[in-house]
Image (cartoon, rainbow, N blue to C red):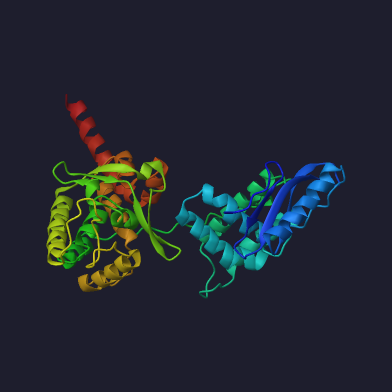
Amino acid sequence: MARRRPNGTGTVTKRKDGRYHGRAYALTPTGERVRVSVYGKTWDEANDKLNEVMRETRAGNPVKREVVKLGDYLDYWCGQVAPSQVRPSTLASYETFIRLHIKPRLGSKRLDRLTPTDIRGFLRVMSTEPGRHGKPLSPRSVQYLHAILRNVLQHAMREELLVRNVARLVQVPTGQPREVQPLTQQEVSALLTAARGRRLYAAYVLMLAVGLRKGEALGLRWSDVDLDARTLRVRSTLQRLNGELHISAPKTSRSRRTLVLPRACVVALRWQRLRLRDEQSAAGRVWDSNGPIFVTGEGRPTEPRNLNRDFYALCKKAGITRHVRVHDLRHTCATILLSQGVDPRVIMDTLGHSTIGMTLNTYAHVLPAANRAAAAQMDSALDGWRQS
């Protein structure tokens, strides 16, 4: 059982690098009562240092604030703060960006001496100089780095380690968003024809027809679908985190949604259910009516990376030579719905977008055709009124 300090005397926690981090409120030379940090190789060493801080502050003696480097504070933030605020997949992404980009260039700087110039220079280097893969980070990744720094420094302000958040003083260019390139009608037809009979055929149909994300499709269980009522509930997502597969809740409340299934989805899911029942019967396993819909031949959940590999092989079989991602099936779904005149708000609900602006901004390239159709309908209505 982890050792704990008495209430009101600070905390000592173990860092990822094996050291121990003690934190408590103390009196500084300026007369302010702020939170200070101490570090030790063992719990006892950090605890003794923290006890000394508390003795000094109880005696009314100002305690010199220990230097906190940004790298150390990032470790603390990732280990103690962020896990209670973000999803595991988001935390894993934060940790990767911090480890690969922020700590190597800014980690040794003192937290209280960071300047807007430091942040601005770091982001400029990330966006202009070749990185690990021989090219600069994308504008989206640079924005992500800026957001991480802004969040971390804002928390440091709340803990009275900083008087201002210098990252908020830095503006980051938005850059050009990646243009959505949905599949053409011919590519969709070729893809579905090539996919028939494959283990993941129904997954591709769902991503194309109702815009499921990859993790949402792989996280589906048979209890989430009612084939007679033609409904599907999105309640979970499958992701690989820290080397293990995890089922977690969708990212936002909007992502938790109930969809009406087109007939093509019902047919594909019925075929999938029959296939799995035959497989499990042949293997001597009992049919699990609450089990995952998309499993391996051994009955385990499908690895997301294996779906990617299968999709790229499928594109090659279908004769699609340009680079297409699994996520482009979701984009194709939205594009088809918009081109058919479906209300953007209905599409927002189908895709699980958090705002209507996200839907309209992402698929603005489809709207001109829809606008022309609306104008034609208005012309028809006005002609009818003039003749009446």
Residue 149 image point, x, y percent: 61, 54
Most foreground residue, 80 or 321: 80
Judge left or right: residue 7 versus residue 332: right
In this rendering, the answer to whether 374 lies above or below 104 is above
Residue 71 image point, x, y percent: 66, 61
Most foreground residue, 139 or 369: 139
Q: Residue furthest top?
A: 388
The image quadrant of residue 285 is bottom left
In this rendering, the answer to whether 2 lies above or below 102 is above
Judge left or right: residue 55 versus residue 380: right
In this rendering, the answer to whether 64 lies above or below 201 is above
Residue 59 image point, x, y percent: 86, 43
Can the viewer see residue 140?
no
Q: Quadrant of the C terminus?
A: top left
Most foreground residue, 217 or 78: 78
Residue 320 image point, x, y percent: 25, 70
Can the viewer see residue 359?
yes
The image quadrant of residue 319 is bottom left
Q: How many marks?
A: 0
Q: Quadrant of the N terminus?
A: bottom right
Judge left or right: residue 380 versus residue 51: left
